[in-house]
Amino acid sequence: MKLPDVRDFNLDQKTVLLRIDTDLPFGDGQVKDDTRLVESLPTINHLLAKGARIIILGHLGRPKGKFTSGLSLKPIASRLEKLVGKEIPLMEDFSKTASLLNMLENLRFWSGEEENDLGFAKKLASLGDFYVNDSFATCHRQHASIVGLPKLLPHAAGLDLLEEMKVLSSVREEPKRPVVVVIGGVKKDKLDCLPGFLDWADLVLIGGKLVVYPEAKEAKSPKKKLADLGKTGEDITLESTIEFVEKIRQAGTIIWSGPLGKVEDGQFQASTRIFAEAVVSSKAFRIVGGGDTEAALTRFGLEGKMDFVSSGGGAMLEYLAYGDLPGLKALKEKETDD
């Protein structure tokens, strides 16, 4: 997939609105994992080196259009300051700033973000001259900062987003077969990708809490296999775990998003750990995505042992299932005068 590349534009003395993924593992006012911020550093450093002023856009959690002190981006800005080595003032409104590097407060404090409100998108656009999307994990959202801004400003993809598309496009277009997709976790909207995967992949394995939803049970296909849950309903059975491991032994490509059990509780980690170790030992091309899956791998000491870790779970699944995302489509279009 060909996207406009931030490196192809002269951004000297321009103010760039940079959308990154700030929805980090977070608790007790502390950032638990700054991987997604680290992934944004190449784009930030590139823009600064080219003489641009940056206003970072991002969100945290689901404040539902209301200011929520516990979901302020202030701790995110503080962590990014340490990574970049520069002060990053937090902007609480749409007043322009003279600072070289800034961060706007949580976009979801304004209802217009998730509603993709044109008026809100215009307020954002008024802050800058150019828009860069470097947040693959939110490219499946029809939000103002993802699909609204590219209609109003010249735009490009950031370096991390370009790397995501380089790998995922290759897998989507020329996969090493058989392709085995493993979907777990609790987020029901992942099952929206099931029809696409049943058409494109060779086998789809479904675990975690997803197995209880009608969408998982009712999809009829010989390519689909549902795990059985244990008595507590918090982990799949050992028999299902062994069956899943057997299913991936002959895979040419493994795509995995979502734990198979409630891994944050130690007594329900068994299936996910066994399966993760089997994926690591596989000779297939191995892609994993999503914060919960990545956190599980870190917990098991298996981080860095996959071929590619996508910054997005839902976005990765939707792109591989259907070959495009709203945020990618927006970047491929020309800005308008709306």
Image: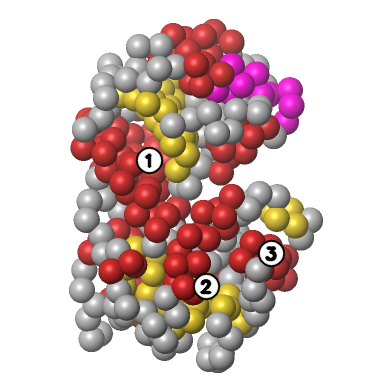
Q: Disc 1 or 2, which lies upstream in sequence?
A: 2
Marks 3 and 2, how far apart at CA: 15 Å
Q: Which of marks 1 and 3 is in front?
A: 3
Disc 3 designates what residue? 82
**Residue depicted at 64% across the width and 73% down the height:** 86
Marks 1 and 2, how far apart at CA: 26 Å
| Colouring style | secondary structure
Q: Nearer the viewer, mark 1 or mark 2?
A: 2
Pick whichever, 270 or 283, lies toward us: 283
Category of crowding for the residue at label 3, using alpha-carbon neighbours closer than 10 angstroms: few (below 14), some (14–19), many (at least 20): few
Task: Identify the disc placed on residue 317.
Answer: 1
Category of crowding for the residue at label 1, using alpha-carbon neighbours closer than 10 angstroms: few (below 14), some (14–19), many (at least 20): many
Mark 3–mark 2 CB contact (< 8 Å):
no
Q: Position of residue 74 (x, y in %)?
A: 69, 71
Residues in magenta, as a range: 265-276
Disc 2 designates what residue? 56
Res 194 seen here: yes
Q: In this view, does 236 lie above or below 96?
A: above
Single out the residue that lies furthest toward the right: 28
Q: Is residue 161 above or below residue 154?
A: above
Marks 1 and 3, how far apart at CA: 32 Å
Pick whichever, 127 or 193, lies toward us: 127
**In this figure, what is the number of numbered marks?**
3
